[in-house]
Amino acid sequence: MSSRSLYAPRPASVRCSGDGTPRLVGGIAVEAVREEWLVEDRWWTPAPLCRRYLELVLDSGRCTVVFCDLVDDRWYEQR
C-alpha cells in the first residue's frame, strides 16, 4: 500500500508566455485560465511557502491546477 497523498503536487512541464501566463502544460495547450491566486504562508519559519496557483482548462478539455513555487521557481501540478 502506498503512503502517497491524494492530490500531492508533482513536478510539471509548464511553458509560459512572456507575461508568465502558462501556454502549455505537459505539451497540451492551455485554452483558458479560470482562476489565479497567491498563497503566502509560513513566512515566519525557515521554510516559507510562496506559490502562484492557476486553475486551467486545457485544449483536451481537462481542468487542472498548477502552481509555481516562487521560492524555487519550479512548476507543479496539483491534480
Image (tube, grey):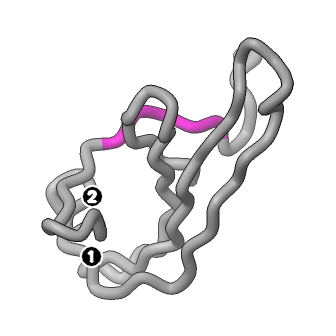
Which quadrant would the N terminus be assigned to in this image? top right
Q: Say if 6 sits above or below 60 in the image.
A: above
Q: Is residue 1 visible?
A: no
Give how far across and how far down residue 51 sits, in percent. Answer: 58, 47
Q: Is residue 59 visible?
A: yes
Give how far across and how far down residue 37 sits, in percent. Answer: 62, 68
Q: Mark 1 highlights which residue?
A: 30
* Res. 57 image quadrant: bottom left
| Residue that protrudes farthest toward the front in the picture | 44
Earlier in the chain: of badge 2 and badge 1, it is 2
Q: Is residue 76 magenta?
A: no
Left/right of residue 15 with respect to residue 39 in the rendered view: left
Q: CA–CA distance between discs 2 and 1?
A: 7 Å
Q: Say if 66 sits above or below 34 in the image.
A: above
* Res. 15 image quadrant: bottom left
Residue type at the position of mark 1:
Val
Give the magenta range.
8-12
Assign a secondary structure to mark 2: strand
Q: Mark 2 highlights which residue?
A: 25
By secondary structure, the bulk of the magenta-drawn segment is best described as loop
Q: Say if 6 sits above or below 72 in the image.
A: below
Give how far across and how far down residue 55 sits, in percent. Answer: 52, 72
Residue that appears at 65% across and 36% down: 8
Q: Nearer the viewer, residue 23 or 6?
A: 23
Give how far across and how far down residue 34 sits, in percent. Answer: 51, 85
The label on residue 17 is none
Residue that appears at 68% across and 34% down: 49
Q: Say if 56 sits above or below 38 in the image.
A: below
Residue type at the position of mark 2:
Val
Left/right of residue 32 with respect to residue 2 in the rendered view: left
Assign a secondary structure to mark 1: strand
| Whether label 2 touches label 1, CB < 8 Å | yes
